[in-house]
Image (tube, grey):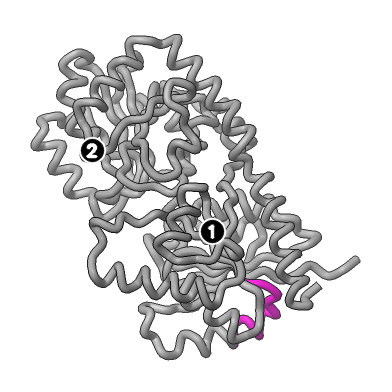
Amino acid sequence: MAKPSNIVYMIDGLGLGGAERLMIPLLANLDREAFSPRVCVFQVRNGNPIAEDLKALGVPVDLLPIPYLRDLSALPRLWRYLRDTRADLVHTQLEFANILGNLAAKGARLPSVCTVHTIPSQEDMKTKTRLHQDVEFFCLRNFCDTVISVSEEADRFHKDVGRLSPRKTTTIYNGIDLARFTAESQRADPQAVRREFDIPAAAPLFITVAVLRELKGIQFMIQAMPAILAQQPEARYLIVGDGDHRAQLIEEVRRQGVEGRVIFAGARKDIPALMSAADVFVLPTLTEALPTVLAEAMAVRLPIVASRVGGVPEMVTDGVNGRLLEPGDPRQLAETCLELLAKPEVRAEMGGRGRSIVEQKFDVRVQAEHLHALYQRLMGSYGKR
């Protein structure tokens, strides 16, 4: 039997962001007879909790500290790392890795793949951030063999803004571990979750799971809560996640006078259990390539209220498995949430259809099969197989 090929995954950090969490089900489903994965992480973010999950899968995790892009020692250290680990292919994710990882791969004459998980908001981008984006796209155009977009809308963005050649781009939807979500949600005790957060057993419960950034739009759902509470005074909004926008969101709760009705759960790993206690999943985001958290919500049969932005319409069809709204509109958010609360049978039907959609389109096993074929093709073109 041929020896497994060494795949090095480079990523900026291993906090609880979407790209980081997605590595767990993907590497759990990667064909280990064909590939031997290891992860190279550049920074410690919130303690890098995902590193322990990866190690539990038997995936080595190496910290190669790169604090900033202008670190002149970064490329020589990366070249030595790729040589010492006998890498056959490099797969990068997030900004630093997409820039430095692809440069290092080409210097080491290795094939490289990049997954771009975001559609940055061009209007709100700062000068430094835009410069970093320009550098990132320059490296992807010139040093990366294949750029994976996670939705068709993201693919169009990367070709337009990033000027990527259609010959080197492909779309592969992110997938989730359906078996895990099914098992964990079935074992979950929704009332235990409600007791933990002092939520009444019959209170309507909305939930958002996201890194707390301004562009996630959570402030708009907080602004919608007074109108919701006027008709549903026992309603609660559970916000799961952490991030640099947390303090501003807490202040928005105070301004809206909804203390005690909006609950911050912090960063959690028991997402299926938390979702199982809710009635509606809300994602009022302003920009999104493909929010995998929506697949997770569909896996536990939650109806969805989400913004019609980016790749969201590739996951949610208005009136089928959820409702799509224009972003940044608290009034419409409140009206739609109240409408769903008034129709439990509609919520159940949407949840069931969402489960069917996630089984068909967002199973991580399908994603792993696509990557398997891509890796083999690229390594063959470099004479690695």
The spot of residue 112 in percent (x, y) is 61, 72
Dot placed on the residue nearer the N-terminal end, 1 or 2: 1
Question: Residue 329 or 283: which is nearer the viewer?
Answer: 329
The quadrant the C terminus occupies is bottom right
Q: Which residues are magenta?
A: 80-90
In the picture, measured across the screen, residue 186 lies left or right of residue 265, that is right
Please determine whether, in this image, residue 186 is positioned above or below residue 18.
above
Q: Which mark is residue 52?
A: 1
In the picture, measured across the screen, residue 197 lies left or right of residue 367, that is left
- At 49% from the left and 36% from the top, the residue drawn is 315
- At 43% from the left and 21% from the top, the residue drawn is 319
Please determine whether, in this image, residue 293 is positioned above or below residue 108.
above
Please determine whether, in this image, residue 232 is positioned above or below residue 269.
above
Question: Residue 43 or 56: which is nearer the viewer?
Answer: 43
Q: Which residue is tagged 2?
A: 328
The spot of residue 99 in percent (x, y) is 46, 75
- At 35% from the left and 32% from the top, the residue drawn is 282
What's the distance in space between the residues labelled 1 and 2, CA to CA?
A: 37 Å
Please determine whether, in this image, residue 201 is positioned above or below residue 79.
above
